[in-house]
Amino acid sequence: MQILDGKKASQAIRDDLKIEVAQRAAEGKKIPHLAAILVGTNGASETYVAAKVRACEEVGFKSTLLHFEESVSETRLLDKIQELNTDPDVDGILVQLPLPKHITDEQVINAIDPEKDVDGFHPVNVGKMVQGLDAFISATPHGIMLLLKHYKIDTRGKHAVVVGRSNIVGRPMSILLSSNNNPGNCTVTVCHSQTKDIKEYCLQADIIVAALGRPGFITADMVKEGVILIDVGITRVEDTGKKSGYKLKGDVDFETVGPKCSWITPVPGGVGPMTIAALMKNTFRSCKLRN
Ligand code: GUN
């Protein structure tokens, strides 16, 4: 069992970016600027957005955090997005999901200028990604592809089983893994809540991407020897031994599944840090394209 260390890979990407940003600054060029919108007081969302802002600081980007109350109206949010769309200093806009129930995610995502949509959620970017055109690829799937690349994992011709079909992870992951790229060129099966026998498909998998948000769902009896396991789950589960009162648990039962894997991502320290590295890369790319 070898570890796909997201912390290390993410650091390597951020170190490279830091150098490139310093170079831009030295040449008098514009520094990337990410604007992050957070609504309400969801603890996990607050943690993720804080980590994104910290990463901006570390690589030398400018960042703006706009924190709205849970009760903010959709109109107010749309107005703010419009303002950011037309602000020439802003290169990337992200709206942390989930949003409160009275706000429609789709309306908000569609309001972001696709050229500033560094989260890659806008239908224009999703459509381009599906067609294999240059696009902002959403941060978690992009981060996973960067992680596979960093560890030179040969995915060509492999059978990848993606468990989960969300717009944020499962669906784009299935498209990227099947694309004619390296990494890519997999034969992909997508499993979801209506799949009759997920275990049967997982047992045939050379690569499993577990992105369903059910802690410990993938167990040792569901995987074959030598599988490559990408665990996207990060559920907070109670842990009275921790100061915070919780620990993060992945969708994979690491203790029993790990020994059967050729490669596996830990939780935390696997996919999570890669999401941030990918977001930084997308923001940098937006800045370069627009300036
Ligand atoms: N919520 C869960 N994952 C993500 C993400 O990658 N970006 C945003 N904006 N919200 C999320």
Image (cartoon, rainbow, N blue to C red):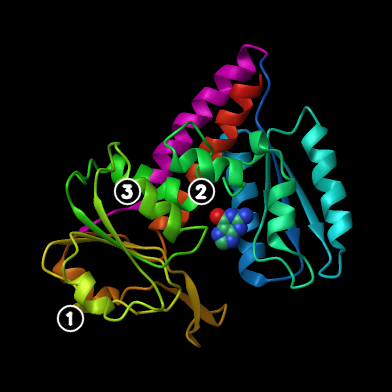
Task: Tell me if label 1 and label 2 are in contact, CB under 8 Å.
Answer: no
| Residue at the image point whose x is 53% and y is 45% from the top | 126
The tag on residue 139 is 2
Is 39 positioned to the left or the right of 172 in the image?
right
The amino acid beneath tag 2 is Ala
Dot 1 alpha-carbon crowd within 10 angstroms: few under 14, some 14 to 19, many 20 or more: few
The outermost residue toward the bottom is 240
What is the spatial separation of the Cα atoms under label 1 and label 3, in whole angstroms? 24 Å
- Please give the residue where the numbered disc 3 appears in the rendered image: 177
Work out whether mark 1 precedes mark 2 in sequence or the reverse, and give the earlier one.
Answer: 2
Task: Tell me if label 1 and label 3 are in contact, CB under 8 Å.
Answer: no
**Residue situated in front as seen by the camera: 38 or 85:** 85
The amino acid beneath tag 3 is Leu
The answer to whether residue 211 is above or below residue 282 is: below
Secondary structure predominantly adopted by residues drawn in magenta: helix
Q: Is mark 2 within 8 Å of ligand 1?
A: yes
Where does the C terminus fall, quadrant-wise?
A: top right
Q: Is residue 16 magenta?
A: yes
What is the spatial separation of the Cα atoms under label 1 and label 2, in whole angstroms? 31 Å
- Please give the residue where the numbered disc 1 appears in the rendered image: 221
Work out whether mark 1 precedes mark 3 in sequence or the reverse, and give the earlier one.
Answer: 3
The magenta span reads 1-28
The tag on residue 169 is none
Is 63 positioned to the left or the right of 71 in the image?
left
The amino acid beneath tag 1 is Asp
| Residue at the image point whose x is 43% and y is 47% from the top | 143
**Residue 43 x/y as whole percent:** 65, 71
**Residue 227 x/y as whole percent:** 17, 62
Work out whether mark 2 precedes mark 3 in sequence or the reverse, and give the earlier one.
Answer: 2
